[in-house]
Image (cartoon, rainbow, N blue to C red):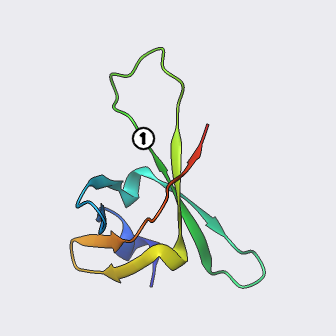
């Protein structure tokens, strides 16, 4: 799958139905030796969160359950927050 195919898809948490964000607004950690995606780094908060510390949620690739035409379903038992 190409990055262009992932771009614009919403990420939805299967456990609580929460919209976590959009792939186009995220970064990815890629294994340089294999070229495989290890995880998606998704920024949290809104554009109006001025003065707040930027936080990110790391979604391991193994947490992805389904990639659909408009969304990606993930199962996040516990979230890994990164400051």
Q: Where is 56 relative to 30, above or below?
A: above
Estimate the x, y position of residue 71 in percent, counting from the top left. 25, 70
Drawn side of residue 66 relative to residue 54, left or right: left
How many numbered circles are shown? 1
For the point 31% across and 72% down, which residue is it? 73
Q: Where is 21 relative to 59, above or below?
A: above
Q: Where is 36 relative to 41, above or below?
A: below
Drawn side of residue 33 relative to residue 83, left or right: right
Q: Where is 26 relative to 69, above or below?
A: above
Estimate the x, y position of residue 60 in percent, counting from the top left. 55, 69
Pointer 1 residue? 44
Hey, which quadrant is residue 46 in on the image?
A: top left
For the point 67% across and 81% down, which residue is it? 35
Estimate the x, y position of residue 32 in percent, counting from the top left. 75, 75
Q: Nearer the viewer, residue 12 or 8?
A: 12
For the point 53% across and 31% down, which residue is it? 54
For the point 39% across and 60% down, which residue is it? 23
Estimate the x, y position of residue 44 in percent, counting from the top left. 42, 41
Find the residue positioned furthest to the top: 51
* Quadrant of the frame with the C terminus: top right
Mark 1 nearby-residue class (10 Å; few <14, some 14–19, many ≥20) = some
Hey, which quadrant is residue 68 in on the image?
A: bottom left
* Quadrant of the frame with the N terminus: bottom left
Assign a secondary structure to mark 1: loop
């Amino acid at each position: 799958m190409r990055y262009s195919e992932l771009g614009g898809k919403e990420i939805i948490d299967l456990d609580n139905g929460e919209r976590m964000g959009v792939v186009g607004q995220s970064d990815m950690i890629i294994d340089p030796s294999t070229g495989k995606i290890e995880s998606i780094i998704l920024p949290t908060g809104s554009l109006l969160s001025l003065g707040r510390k930027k936080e990110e949620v790391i979604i391991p690739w193994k947490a992805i359950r389904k990639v659909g035409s408009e969304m990606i379903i993930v199962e996040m038992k516990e979230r890994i927050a990164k400051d």
